[in-house]
Image (cartoon, rainbow, N blue to C red):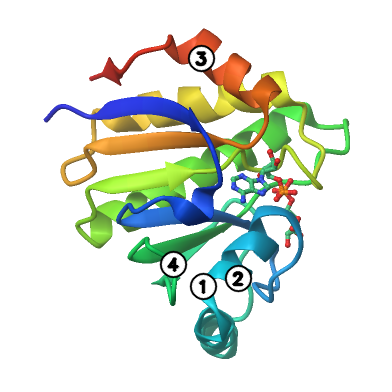
């Protein structure tokens, strides 16, 4: 199975893929940044579905992920994952939790037989994860998961700023990276 990894600059709410990944918080009740943009674009049904998940299982742990429909978004699903807040101590633990956001999101995409998934640069905004380190952790986690993927064939890292785009392009090259 060939899986393509690529990076694009843009607003993840505009991507017409099987799933976009939301950099949520553990309450799943929305927020600012990409979380706010996704909930605004999806409409109130997204928050209602998140409320149902919270009623059923409580919130979402850091490093874990949950999947919902996508309301008015062009994507079919939203995978909500909670990245670590960068505090500077225990950096290896932060790396592990950030990598888990990517691998758990891919696991959910596989369980739902999805083919295409778009990731934002999780934890690099409000949560303050250093962008160079986050890019390496994200790409490393996805590359190590690729061999196990069967339904996911198209992975897009959606960057919202030039710094992240340059970092991802440095690691991925300008073209497609296929495995
Ligand atoms: N499309 C793609 N990427 C975006 C968008 C967008 N529309 N809006 C913001 N981003 C980028 C930011 O520039 C950053 O690079 O998403 C990345 C993640 O930043 P945040 O959204 O701040 O997420 P994070 O750092 O993981 O912090 C999560 O912020 O919004 C709250 O509820 C959220 O508490 C949670 C926290």
Q: Of callouts 3 and 4, which one flags the residue occurring earlier in the amino acid sequence?
A: 4
- Decide: marks 1, 4 in contact (CB < 8 A)? yes
- Residue 135 % position (x, y): 60, 24
Image quarter where the N terminus lies is: top left
- Residue 69 % position (x, y): 39, 74
Image quarter where the C terminus lies is: top left
Q: Is residue 43 above or below residue 3?
A: below
Q: Which residue is mark 1?
A: 42
- Decide: marks 2, 4 in contact (CB < 8 A)? no
Query: At 55% across and 68% down in the image, what residue appears?
Result: 41
Viewed as shown, does residue 73 lie left or right of 167? left
Q: Of callouts 1 and 4, which one flags the residue occurring earlier in the amino acid sequence?
A: 1
Secondary structure category for the residue under label 4:
loop
Query: At 87% across and 32% down in the image, what residue appears?
Result: 89
Q: Quadrant of residue 114?
A: bottom left
C-alpha gap between disc 3 and disc 4: 27 Å
C-alpha gap between disc 2 and disc 4: 9 Å
Mark 4 crowd level (few <14, some 14–19, many ≥20, 10 Å Cα): many
C-alpha gap between disc 2 and disc 3: 28 Å
Q: Is residue 23 above or below residue 87?
A: below
Q: Is residue 26 above or below residue 102?
A: below
Is residue 21 something one can see in this rendering?
Answer: no
Label 3 vs label 4, nearer the camera: 4
Q: Which residue is mark 2?
A: 39
Q: Which residue is mark 3?
A: 169
C-alpha gap between disc 1 and disc 2: 5 Å
Q: Which residue is mark 4?
A: 73
- Residue 130 % position (x, y): 77, 27
């Amino acid at each position: 199975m060939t899986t393509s990894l690529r990076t694009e600059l843009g607003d993840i709410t505009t991507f017409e893929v099987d799933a976009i990944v939301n950099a949520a918080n553990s309450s799943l009740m929305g927020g600012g940044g990409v979380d706010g943009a996704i909930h605004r674009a999806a409409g109130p049904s997204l928050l209602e579905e998140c409320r149902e998940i919270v009623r059923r299982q409580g919130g979402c742990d850091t490093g874990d992920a949950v999947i919902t429909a996508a309301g008015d978004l062009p994507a079919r699903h939203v995978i909500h994952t909670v990245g670590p807040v960068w505090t500077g101590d225990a950096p290896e633990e932060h790396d592990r939790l950030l990598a888990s956001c990517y691998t758990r999101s891919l696991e959910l995409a596989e369980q739902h037989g999805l083919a295409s998934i778009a990731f934002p640069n999780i934890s690099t905004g409000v949560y303050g994860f250093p962008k160079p380190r986050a890019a390496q952790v994200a790409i490393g986690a996805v590359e190590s998961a690729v061999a196990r993927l069967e339904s996911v064939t198209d992975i897009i890292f959606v960057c919202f700023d030039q710094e992240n785009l340059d970092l991802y392009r440095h690691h991925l090259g300008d073209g497609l990276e296929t495995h």
